[in-house]
Image: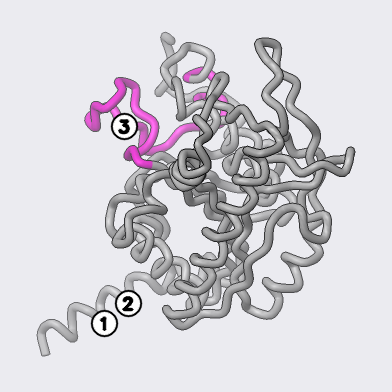
């Protein structure tokens, strides 16, 4: 009886958050090594299904870098990167498309096994994402793409019928070629186009920290201006730069809040949504810097 009472209290405490985000679109980007870990993947997908049954409208955008690397090695191709962007020749683009299609189908099936309806698609379908070639000053990186435009018609139909869209970031270019778009960037643009309440970027670190790997310096909340200062001052570095920029772009495009959280924490999404303090870094659109970055 005591355990049942505890569970009922937890549900009642969640009620204000369920009410707040009822019928709201929440875009979640999930990728990296966490996709390869069965327990982490299941935990995140369970959270997404819970959100769906609670009346929220989750949209999942996935990457798959480690899986693509594995498929490339199987094809005797060595993965190459320039400033974090995958060098994508024609053969690599074929591998990327095939690998992400396989991952997409796996995620859809796992969501269905958890009891929700899901539908997988890539950015190339129905002109969901139109891309242009990334022109890099250091090298020709081939079919690496940047988002040119978004058409959310098919996503909106799925959302209206309570089906969870699962999107891979392969896009059709304005030149008719296929392009590999960074999943953080794709999620950001989809969140903007859908006028999402929140964008979640799931990664393998707790959030943005003033001192790398020092949890005592974790920023629980940042203004948009704070985040821009931390990027400019090289406090946010390496792989956190595109994730932070994705959040900044989303907020500039009218998304209300963006979050960077650690997907390795059990039920990370629910902890971020249903608690006041959260577990990662939230970035919100305030018009000025706060005391957090004064003196930097």
Q: How is the image coloured?
A: one colour
Point out residue 69 in the picture as x, y percentages from the top left corner: 47, 40
Q: Label 3, label 2: how many angstroms apart (C-alpha)?
A: 28 Å
| Front of the two marks 3 and 1 | 3
Q: Are marks 3 and 1 in contact (CB under 8 Å)?
A: no
- Quick one: label 3 or label 1, which is nearer the N terminus? 1
Q: Secondary structure at mark 3?
A: loop
- Front position in the image: 72 or 175: 72
Q: Residue at x 50, y 30 (%)?
A: 78
Point out residue 221 in the picture as x, y percentages from the top left corner: 42, 37
From where the camera sits, is residue 63 visible? Answer: yes
Q: Residue at x 65, y 32 (%)?
A: 88
Image quarter in which the C terminus is found:
top left
| Front of the two marks 3 and 2 | 3
Q: Residue at x 77, y 66 (%)?
A: 154
Q: What mark, if any, has residue 81 been given in the picture?
A: none
The residue labelled by disc 3 is 218
- Front position in the image: 70 or 153: 70
- Quick one: label 3 or label 2, which is nearer the N terminus? 2
Q: Are marks 1 and 2 in contact (CB under 8 Å)?
A: yes
Q: Secondary structure at mark 1?
A: helix
Magenta segment: does it hold 210?
Answer: yes
The 10 Å Cα crowd at callout 2, few under 14, some 14 to 19, many 20 or more, is few
The residues colored magenta run 204-230
Q: Secondary structure at mark 2?
A: helix
Q: Judge from the rendering whether residue 283 lies leftward or rightward of residue 24; answer left or right.
A: left
The residue labelled by disc 1 is 8
Q: Residue at x 71, y 19 (%)?
A: 140
Point out residue 164 in the picture as x, y percentages from the top left corner: 59, 70
| Residue that lies at the very extreme toward the bottom in this rendered image | 1
Q: Is residue 33 above or below residue 54?
A: above
The residue labelled by disc 2 is 11
């Amino acid at each position: 009886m005591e355990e049942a009472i505890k569970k009922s209290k937890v549900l009642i405490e969640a009620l204000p958050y369920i009410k707040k985000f009822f019928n709201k679109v929440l875009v979640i980007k999930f990728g990296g090594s966490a996709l390869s870990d069965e327990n982490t993947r299941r935990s995140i997908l369970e959270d997404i299904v819970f959100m769906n049954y609670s009346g929220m409208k989750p949209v999942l955008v996935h990457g798959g870098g480690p899986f693509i690397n594995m498929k490339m090695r199987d094809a005797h191709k060595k993965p190459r990167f320039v400033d974090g962007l995958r060098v994508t020749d024609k053969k690599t683009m074929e591998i990327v498309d095939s690998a992400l299609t396989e991952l997409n189908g796996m995620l859809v099936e796992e969501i269905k096994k958890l009891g929700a309806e899901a539908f997988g698609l890539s950015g190339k379908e129905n002109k969901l994402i139109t891309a242009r070639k990334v022109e890099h000053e250091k090298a020709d990186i081939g079919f690496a793409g940047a988002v040119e435009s978004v058409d959310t018609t098919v996503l909106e139909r799925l959302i209206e019928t309570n089906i969870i869209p699962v999107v891979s970031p392969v896009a059709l270019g304005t030149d008719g070629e296929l392009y590999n778009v960074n999943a953080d960037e794709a999620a950001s643009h989809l969140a903007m186009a859908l006028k999402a309440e929140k964008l979640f970027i799931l990664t393998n670190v707790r959030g943005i920290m003033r001192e790398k790997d020092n949890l005592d310096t974790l920023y629980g909340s940042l203004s948009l201006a704070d985040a821009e200062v931390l990027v400019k001052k090289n406090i946010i570095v390496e792989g956190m730069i595109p994730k932070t920029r994705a959040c900044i772009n989303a907020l500039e495009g009218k998304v209300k809040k963006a979050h960077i959280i650690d997907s390795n924490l059990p039920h990370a999404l629910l902890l971020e949504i249903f608690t006041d303090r959260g577990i990662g870094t939230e970035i919100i659109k305030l018009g000025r810097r706060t005391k957090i970055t004064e003196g930097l």
